[in-house]
Amino acid sequence: MFRTSISRISTLFRNPNPHRLLIPNPIPITTKNIKKAQIFIPKMPSQQILPITYHPPPSTTEKLLSKSEDDPATRLLLFSHFEDEEKPAPLRPLLPKSASYTFNTSSASAAAATPAGSANNNQKRRRRTASDNSLYSSSEEAAERHSIAGDVEHAAAETYLVTRLSLKLLSYLGVGYRWITRFMALGCYSFLLMPGFIQVGYYYFFSKQVRRGIVYGDQPRNRLDLYLPKNSDGPKPVIAFITGGAWIIGYKAWGSLLGQQLSERDIIVACIDYRNFPQGTISSMVQDASQGISFVCNHIAEYGGDPNRVYVMGQSAGAHIGACAIVDQAIKELGEGESTSWSVSQINAYFGLSGGYNLFNLVDHFHSRGLYRSIFLGIMEGENSLHRFSPEVMIQDPNVRTAASLLPPIILFHGTADYSIPSDASKNFAETLQNLGVKAESILYEGKTHTDLFLQDPMRGGRDDMFEDLVAIIHEGDSEALARDAVAPPRRRLVPEFMLKLAHKVSPF
């Protein structure tokens, strides 16, 4: 009986985890058993003799450690607390900077009696000042590096989003001969204009005149970029610009070339991003554009803009979205009790560049160009919604026809050689508006394609008609701005002429 008790006691002491015994039914240790065990211990080999010590009950920390082996949540809570405690506390100076400076100043005045002491103190103060300046400059450089890194990370994330959505769209379209040839043409077109894209991209990411990623709403991609003039004397006119991209690949950075060149003429440009298909449909795009315009109208004064000189402009699909937003806002203002955050009366004029405004006339045309009917109707939320999202048709509806009187002046630019959206789209819309009493005008440019007015001509440098017409309308009535425009230097060439001509021929647009 004594040997059995000693055997079980030895097993207890050899167990590395005293709180988890290996014995199935351990015998309680009593004073009597311990005394009997002590009688038997001298007979055991010396290497098997173990000291008998008292083990206190486990503490709360030990219980948590034991529980953490089986419970991951306990392990996360426990070890994250320990890691925080192990972090070294930040070192702080014993004296604040003001106190240190006061001490040094008083020491210097006390030592002014001795020339050597005064020289030493002055030298120490100069070293301290130089050290402080270096610390400030290094912190500013670190903040600037962090800002650039954040901007690049944001651009990479949105590029990934656009790529993912484009691949998803391709899964809807399927890959056929027509799309393969168009993508090959797009690759050649982009390669020929790459010298200009690189320079514009460098300006977009590194210019201090660009404010990227300003949030204007709570939906995905509700951001805009601001292009600010270097001259900051007085409030500037503003263009809220909605980029194109076939309602599928639109992105705010596509307007960086226009934004850069208009900002050189003392015009602020706000490039509005919006949800594309399949992330959103046309109603989401119009909603985002309207909210972006509202942000510009209500907050542009904070960035040096003149809220009394706000213009709206769109290009290609962006021209269609912008026109829908303007017409929809005018219709809302006719309704009683309709709450709006901006008014069409705040818009001085609307500029449409190479846009389409009657979807009934464009369905078959887009289908023949590769934007298949099923996809296009999916973007426009079905055939029954074509009436609602055709500004030219909607404004003629007898129920809302009086909304035309609220519209601002509308100027439509278009190239006669545009095969993506025929120039008749702008011509017909302008004539419809004129018949309703709206001040409207269509300006056609002979031989210009869908992208000539927006990309090739600006990259060619010098002076082009569409850009000068746009600036002249914005600066109308401002004699000082018109005088500066008259002596403005010609724009710099970004791409060699032979590459521009080849891009014009291979353009898939």
Image (cartoon, grey):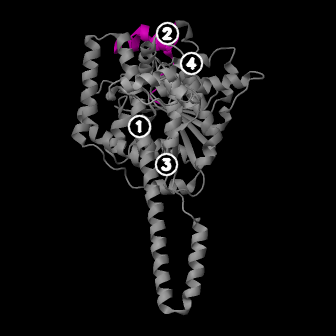
For the residues carrying marks 3 and 2, which lies nearer the camera in this image? 2
The image shows residue 372 at horizontal and vertical percentages of 39, 10
Q: Nearer the viewer, mark 4 or mark 3?
A: 3
Query: Which quarter of the image is occupied by the N terminus?
Result: top left
Mark 1 residue type = Glu
Q: Quadrant of residue 444?
A: top left
Tell me where the magenta segment starts and ends, as one range: 353-382
Tell me which label, 3 or 1, sits earlier in the chain: 3
**Residue at 46% over, 62% down:** 135
Is residue 160 in view?
A: yes
For marks 2 and 1 on the same chain, the one whose residue lies earlier in the sequence: 2
Q: The residue tagged with tag 4: helix, strand or loop?
A: helix
Q: Give the CA distance from mark 2 to mark 1.
A: 62 Å
| Amino acid tagged 2 | Asn
Name the mark on residue 246: none
Which dot marks residue 153? 1
Q: How far separated are the C-alphas under marks 3 and 2?
A: 48 Å
As measured in the structure, the alpha-carbon distance from the residue carrying label 4 to the one carrying label 3 is: 54 Å
Q: Report the residue marked by disc 4.
A: 283
Dot 1 or dot 4, earlier in sequence: 1
Kind of element beneath mark 3: loop
Q: Earlier in the sequence, mark 3 or mark 2?
A: 2
Toward the viewer: 116 or 34?
A: 34
Task: Determine the CA span between mark 1 and mark 4.
Answer: 29 Å
Q: Which is closer to the viewer, label 1 or label 4?
A: 1
Residue 88 numbered tag? 3
Magenta residue check for 365? yes
Q: Is residue 87 above or below residue 93?
A: above
Density class for disc 4 (Cα within 10 Å; few <14, some 14-19, many ≥20) is some
